[in-house]
């Protein structure tokens, strides 16, 4: 079964005819030539395919394109629309927060989405997980400037780096959060 | 992935009618489990009825002090909801201890409950599995046993339900509102999921085509003092080996009321009714907590590879209750 979907990717509108089985990740890579989001595990476990879908970070490998007709998608490439790097991308470079680089676009997009979540006051298992906070359910989530190592690790646990560049990814994200 | 027909229903009754006519169809919510299982050729629906935009995606206060959660509410919104965090903190903690940030943004509340009860062999189409293909045998019982169930198992299936949310909801006496081919009904959360028995292919009591529209939480003032503790092989983004959801009301050192449920131990979220009964009216101390935990676990049937879950479940129950009551006295 083929269907027509409209999706806006990194600011550019597209109309595509896709097989209903097409994931958003495959639509981006195979149909639109946008290879920014990477196919790692293709099962939602590694985070290499992370994009912002209507403003929220998601695994694009588990999203059927047909179910998101009209969606706004931002990939890591879209964070630097005119070649001007996003502060998160600058921070990753400054901290050497990668080795092979395959997970990096997913890490960067996930980190941008994660900081928005923290700024909106969303708690994490680290923020909300302490029984000392019983009764209050934990306070508001930390602001970007207060993201401890543990907070960043917990909130970024959906992005794996097989080169284990975590030791530099965490401070890169914290630096971007302070800006 | 096998091909399928895709439909987006305009109404709940329309969605139910569409699926009623398609015995091999399925509802599609966030898709985080279903799309994955379709890629693995474990799920083979010939029709997907997209219900993600069909039901409410909000949390609202009910007049008698309870809370109604729309079925389509994303896991991340539910976890961050101020009302949920204030009145039922263990519910927020349970959600935040599950999956990853990306998955929680996609996954819906009803979809979280209806993710498949599973084990690694269920996901692997090259191995026999009674849940995936009834009558073919269970590979897990003789296989890798670390994650398997210790309570309510059958010779046919030892898989566990992986949802943390479901454990908290079971402890809180939540009810699930549905619309199906036979009309509306309300199902207690503790009765939504089944034990495997001889029919492990059925995870829940829902009929084919029955759609969850909302989950209602009754008022439970002492749940403002509640906690979800999850023990797992990694610090984050891993299924529970054992999880405990608990709320307790203590006055003058005596337990007035208590709610306890376990995760990671059974084919369904396990409400610890025996432990609760022993705890009510008794002293809020470590010795009684241990007795209650042991009573709950009296009927365990562990396998060699998951026998560690028995003391782990006991200790996690005791520790969670101690944390809630101010620690050792």
Image (cartoon, rainbow, N blue to C red):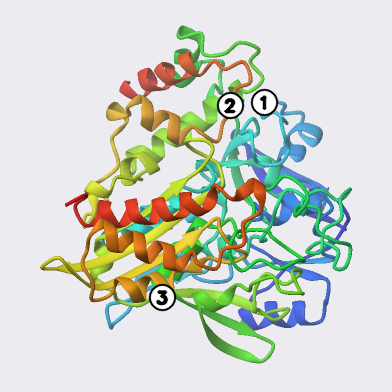
* Element assignment for label 1: loop
- Residue farthest to the bottom, as pictured: B182
Residue at 56%, 58% (x, y): give it: B265
Label 3 to label 2: alpha-carbon separation: 43 Å
Residue B279 in which image quadrant: bottom left
| Residue A126 image point, x, y percent | 35, 39
Task: Quickly name the residue at label 1.
Answer: A36
Front-most of B285 and A115?
Answer: B285
Can you tell which of label 1 and label 3 is closer to the viewer? 3
Dots 1 and 3 on the same chain: no
User: Looking at the picture, does residue A166 appear above or below residue B16?
Assistant: above
Residue at 51%, 13% (x, y): give it: A97
Can you tell which of label 3 and label 2 is closer to the viewer? 3
Left or right: B324 in relation to A124: left
Residue at 35%, 64% (x, y): give it: B291
Q: Determine the chain carrying the residue at label 2.
A: A
Task: Quickly name the residue at label 3.
Answer: B173
Front-most of A17 and A63?
Answer: A63
| Residue A28 image point, x, y percent | 73, 35
């Amino acid at each position: 079964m083929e269907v027509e979907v409209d999706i806006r990717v990194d600011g550019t509108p597209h109309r595509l005819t896709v097989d209903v089985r097409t994931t958003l990740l495959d639509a981006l890579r195979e149909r639109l030539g946008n290879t920014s989001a990477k196919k790692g595990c293709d099962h939602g476990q590694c985070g290499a395919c992370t994009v912002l879908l209507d403003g929220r970070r998601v695994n694009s490998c588990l999203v059927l394109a047909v179910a998101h007709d009209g969606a706004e998608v931002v990939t890591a490439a879209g964070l630097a629309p005119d070649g001007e790097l996003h502060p998160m991308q600058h921070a990753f470079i400054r901290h050497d927060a990668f080795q092979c680089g395959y997970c990096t676009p997913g890490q960067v997009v996930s980190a941008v989405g994660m900081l928005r979540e923290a700024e909106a006051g969303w708690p994490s298992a680290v923020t909300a997980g302490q029984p000392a906070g019983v009764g209050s359910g934990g306070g508001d989530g930390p602001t970007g400037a207060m993201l401890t190592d543990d907070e960043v690790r917990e909130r970024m646990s959906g992005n794996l780096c097989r080169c284990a560049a975590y030791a530099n990814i965490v401070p890169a994200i914290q630096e971007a959060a302070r800006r | 992935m096998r091909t399928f027909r895709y439909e987006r229903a305009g109404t709940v009754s329309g969605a139910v009618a569409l699926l009623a006519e398609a015995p091999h169809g399925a509802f599609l919510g966030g898709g985080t489990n279903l799309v994955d299982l379709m890629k693995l050729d474990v799920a083979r629906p010939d029709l997907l009825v997209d219900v993600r935009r069909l039901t409410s995606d909000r949390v609202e206060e009910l007049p008698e002090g309870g809370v109604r959660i729309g079925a389509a509410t994303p896991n991340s919104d539910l976890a961050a909801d101020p009302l949920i965090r204030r009145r039922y903190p263990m519910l927020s903690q349970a959600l935040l201890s599950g999956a990853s940030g990306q998955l929680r943004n996609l996954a819906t509340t009803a979809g979280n409950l209806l993710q498949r009860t599973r084990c690694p062999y269920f996901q692997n189409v090259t191995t026999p599995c009674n849940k995936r293909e009834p009558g073919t045998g269970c590979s897990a019982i003789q296989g890798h046993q670390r994650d398997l169930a210790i309570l309510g198992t059958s010779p046919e299936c030892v898989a566990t339900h992986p949802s943390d949310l479901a454990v908290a909801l079971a402890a809180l006496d939540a009810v699930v509102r549905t619309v199906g081919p036979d009309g509306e009904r309300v199902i207690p959360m503790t009765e939504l999921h089944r034990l495997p028995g001889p029919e492990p292919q059925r995870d829940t009591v829902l009929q084919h085509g029955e759609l969850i529209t909302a989950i209602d939480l009754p008022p439970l003032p002492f749940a403002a003092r509640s906690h979800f503790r999850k023990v797992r092989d990694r610090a984050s983004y891993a299924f529970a080996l054992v999880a405990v959801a608990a709320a307790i009301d203590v006055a003058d050192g005596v337990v007035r009321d208590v709610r306890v449920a376990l995760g990671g131990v059974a084919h369904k979220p396990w409400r610890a009714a025996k432990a609760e009964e022993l705890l009510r009216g008794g002293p809020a101390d470590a010795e009684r907590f241990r007795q209650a935990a042991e009573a709950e676990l009296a009927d365990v049937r562990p396998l060699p590879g998951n026998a560690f879950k028995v003391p782990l479940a006991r200790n996690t129950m005791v520790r969670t209750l101690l944390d809630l009551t101010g620690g050792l006295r």
